[in-house]
Image (cartoon, rainbow, N blue to C red):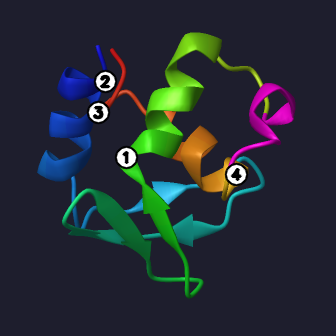
Amino acid sequence: MIEEVWQRIVENEGNIFKQIRGKQFVYTVVGTSIKLTTTNQLVAKSEFEKAVPYLPLSNTVPIQHLRAPSYIYAILTDKRIID
């Protein structure tokens, strides 16, 4: 499943996403990571892979142990990524 999810993440590079509290962000794909525009962080594909078993997500609590959980939540709950 992560390969399909990652492909959708790659396809949506440059699109606007919205965090749970409404803050908008964009990301660029850098190898097997994404670079967030609103913070100087890279989030690896492996972090998304760790989050997938927690889907569907209703908040960020189950993935708080991951890097940038609010961004992962925003991406993995977006209909462009998970339908």
Question: In this view of the protein, which residue sits in the foreground, 41 or 79?
Answer: 41
Q: Is 66 positioned to the left or the right of 77 in the image? A: right
Within-10-Å neighbours for mark 3: few <14, some 14–19, many 20+: some
Which mark is drawn over residue 2? Answer: 2
**Image-quadrant location for residue 74:** top right
What is the span of residues highlighted in magenta in the rendered image? 60-66
Q: Amino acid at mark 4?
A: Ser
- Residue assigned mark 1: 45
Q: Which is more N-terminal, label 2 or label 4?
A: 2
Is the Cβ of the residue at disc 4 closer than 8 Å to that at disc 2?
A: no
- Residue assigned mark 3: 80
- Residue assigned mark 4: 70
Q: Which is more N-terminal, label 3 or label 4?
A: 4
Q: Which element is circle 2 on?
A: helix
Q: Amino acid at mark 2?
A: Ile
Name the residue located 17 percent from the left edge and 50 percent from the top edge.
10
Is the Cβ of the residue at disc 3 closer than 8 Å to that at disc 1?
A: no
Q: Is residue 62 visible?
A: yes
